[in-house]
Image: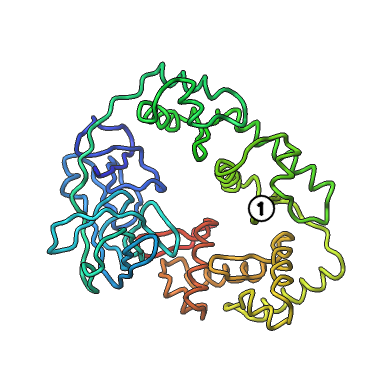
Amino acid sequence: MKPVVGVVGDMPEPNEAYEFVPYRRDVPVDAVLSPVEIETPEWLPVVADPRDLKRAIRRWAFTIEEAQDVRGPGTVVWGTLANARLRMGETAVKEGFERSMRIREIRVDGRTVQSAEPGDEVALAFGPVPISLFRKGGVLRPGRPAQIEPKAAPNRDVKEAILAAVGDDPAGRGTAAILKALDRTPQQLGDAFEALKREGRLLGFAGQWINPRAFDQGADRLIEALDMLHARNPAQPSQPVAKVLGAAHLSWSGKPLERILARLVEKGAIARREDEIRRPGFRVKLGDRQRGFLDRVVSLLDESGVNPPNAHELGKRLPAPAQAVSEVLALGEDVGEIVELADGVIFTTQGLLRLRERVRDGAGGRPFTLGEMRDSLGASRRVAVALLERFDAEGFTERQGEKRIVKPT
């Protein structure tokens, strides 16, 4: 895998040794080529001359802390990354061992990611690799990159034929149907599909291909139907997906539907809980019993401070059956009074806002580590990790190398 270099300003001439891309902070790169000084993480090298790239680009190092044989992922190794960014698709080699091993999955804070940065506590899945290779204290480094033959750009006529076969229906068309219509094999059209995705001319959802304009029309129909159902059922927090699809006259289903809903959730158009969806701004009208039960839960969560009880512990303290607790927590999220973070960590909305201000005041404008924030708040590691994941996602905090900083308001 060639090193990826982010470029500020004019793109240099193509180079077989590097892949050049426009620099953005959200794009994983191994170095930055910039004629002016810019702010980047301290571990990311910045050079002004392409001739300096080879010397500047660092090799990542991964210190092994633990290894286990896990059903499914195979051999999983935990440790800390140093020196440089690690990206999916790379291979690793253990010091003193010549064989390169392909990294099948990267996880940070329990989430699958496309890249990890220095300072991250990382889990690497290698598949069926002998666990005896990974001794505590050992170091993994980049392995030999796979040799990939360059491919010719897909023919324009082929791409136009695919677009014509997909058509303008919001339901789109499956890969098998397109191949049959064009009398081609997956190998013959695979590069053309990927090129159309990169160009933004085609959207792919688990083998279902949709024209972007048609997809937007379908998404608008789904949202209009959802708004209509909310208006008819003001006491119901969310609506079954099948019911909304029926009202919108859409035939999305199966895995493509799952991917489509995930895209709409990511864009903030809908919120989802299992097989039901709702509009993010919709608020239910609570009955007296619902209001009273929710008030008890809110009070318990606020009294618990920075280490709140999980759903099971709430059920013991109320006391209340697990299903009733689950329903009231969902209701609390729907009315905007309760927020559930990663790993089952639950806060009231106001409690989370108070913690944000404590973190801002405690940081005082200085970068801080997860451990420093945890100790400052008096929180458990589980709660601290969940809080930082939420703060990062909201844009309240931002990574700076191994630390984070509260972004100025």
Q: Which residue is at a point 33% across and 60% down the rendered structure image? A: 125
Q: How many marks?
A: 1
Q: Quadrant of the C terminus?
A: bottom right
Residue extending farthest to the top is 157
Q: Position of residue 28 (x, y in %)?
A: 35, 48
Q: Position of residue 277 (x, y in %)?
A: 68, 50
Q: In terms of secondary structure, where does tag 1 sit?
A: loop
Q: Quadrant of the N terminus?
A: top left
Three-letter code, disc 1? Asp
Query: From the viewer's perspective, is 340 left or right of 374?
Result: right
> In this orientation, which residue lies closer to the viewer: 15 or 136?
136
Q: Position of residue 119 (x, y in %)?
A: 33, 65
Q: Which residue is at a point 60% across and 32% down the rendered structure image? A: 215
The image quadrant that residue 348 belongs to is bottom right
Q: Which residue is mark 1?
A: 275
Mark 1 surroundings: few (<14), some (14-19) or many (≥20) residues within 10 A: few
> In this orientation, which residue lies closer to the viewer: 381 or 104?
104
